[in-house]
Image (spheres, helix red, strand yellow):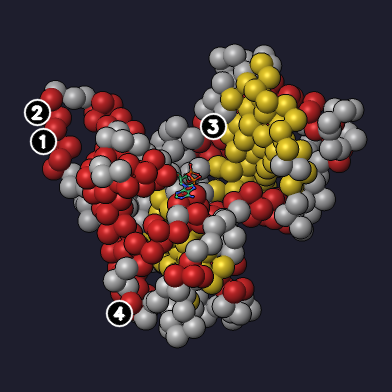
Amino acid sequence: MNILVINAGSSSLKYQLMDPDTGAVSAKGLCERIGIDGKFTYKVDGKTVIDAEPIAMPTHAEAIEAVLAALVNAKHGVIGSMDEIDAVGHRVLHGGAKFTKSCLVDEACKQAIRECIPLGPLHNPANLIGIEACEKVMPGKPQVAVFDTAFHMTMPAEAYIYALPYEYYEKDQVRRYGFHGTSHRYIAERALALLGREKNPEGTKIINCHLGNGSSLCAIKDGKCVDTTMGLGPLAGIPMGTRCGDIDGTIIEYLMSRYGYDIKEMMNILNKKSGVLGISGVSSDFRDLEAAEQSGNERAKLALDKFFYETRKAIGAYAAAMGGVDAIVFTAGVGENGVANRARVMKGLEYLGAKLDPERNNTRGKEALISTDDSTVKVFVIPTNEELMIAKDTAALAK
Ligand code: ADP
């Protein structure tokens, strides 16, 4: 089976052609600068075949056409014709409280995604454009929407409600939604399998640390999300590459009145100029920060210390929320590759019964148990695979 997985942004579109049963990716790539000058990359079996070729892409429809043309191309294509694509799966950012799982795209589904635009103003319009571009170029092909928020819809009310006047929840849908849900769900399934509990998840307690440029933690009890660090939007939780994470709302009023910022400028600071970039003044990239720290940069050290401290605190909070923890998982760019980073997060968590094995922890980018044999909490590295989850949901619903 061939599933085309699409992740459409406002001016970009990532794609993968994938077998949902094996996870094998036959081709993948990226369309960038849609609506500007159009850049196209295409990889087969991990090797770059087309790199940044300028292709006219005034809209996402031309981007999808370029993807299909490359996939069926006589020289470097991987399928004979478009008929060999069984279905298309789309990553959609915000499903509000409406979508608790993935859904086959029809008019009602599109309307519901449209209704969630106020909650995901940057991403949902782009996701819809991606869906409609596929409808135009591949009419009749089954399409599935997979939501970043869906996995979190099992949170209890005490976890998702904000302590604001209740009418904002009732009338305006202000509540915690959480993101990276497809990644957290993939990790939950893999972690349960590694614990030998995929058939009987009741009673299991897993904390997943998705640490990348955007970061979030998820508390997973009985295989279901019971809390997560991101909120109404992806700005909340632990500090990130450029996002501030949780801050006191008073700061917003204070800085706006001191500097005369309007709300757009203020939000830009919180989203793009904060996090580890904001503290360090060096970079949002953890490799740059580690290098700067090693050469004696105190603010790079402080940015990293803050990130590890808040991550460790969130782990402690979720252990308290679930009444214990069986497994802690590290995933995404920093979680999968940052050997020293994982050790620094885990430092001081021995009281929970979680002991890292330094030799086992010396691993990158592959599934591994990194705790000692006598650690009562198992600590794993599990590379995330949101695309595989999207492909599997798409295949199941398209049938
Ligand atoms: P995104 O949220 O954009 O998907 P990723 O999950 O790809 O982000 O994570 C990107 C982050 O992972 C970057 O900050 C990068 O520095 C970090 N990273 C990648 N490789 C390593 C490594 N070997 N050691 C430490 N950090 C790493």
| Residue at 39 percent of width and 77 percent of height | 354
Mark 1, residue position: 254
Packing grade of label 1 (10 A; few <14, some 14-19, many >=20) is: few
| Residue at 65 percent of width and 23 percent of height | 52
Amino acid identity at mark 4: Tyr
Q: Can residue 318 be seen here?
A: yes
Q: Is residue 36 left or right of residue 51?
A: left
Packing grade of label 2 (10 A; few <14, some 14-19, many >=20) is: few
- Residue 398 higher or lower than 76, as above or below: below
Label 4 vs label 2: CA separation?
A: 44 Å
Q: Relative to the observer, which residue lies in front, 166 or 122? A: 122
Q: Nearer the viewer, mark 4 or mark 2?
A: 4
Mark 3 or 1, nearer chain start: 3
Amino acid identity at mark 1: Tyr
Amino acid identity at mark 2: Arg
Q: Can residue 133 be seen here?
A: no
Mark 3, residue position: 9
Label 1 vs label 2: CA separation?
A: 6 Å
Q: Where residue 304 sits: x, y (%)? A: 30, 50
Mark 4, residue position: 351
- Residue 371 higher or lower than 118, as above or below: below
Q: Is residue 162 left or right of residue 232?
A: left
- Disc 3 to disc 1: CB gap under 8 Å: no
- Disc 1 to disc 4: CB gap under 8 Å: no
Mark 2, residue position: 258
Label 2 vs label 3: CA separation?
A: 34 Å
| Residue at 40 percent of width and 76 percent of height | 355
- Judging from the image, what secondary structure is the residue with disc 4 in? helix
Q: Relative to the observer, which residue lies in front, 181 or 275? A: 275
Label 1 vs label 4: CA separation?
A: 39 Å
Mark 1 or 4, nearer chain start: 1
- Disc 1 to disc 2: CB gap under 8 Å: yes
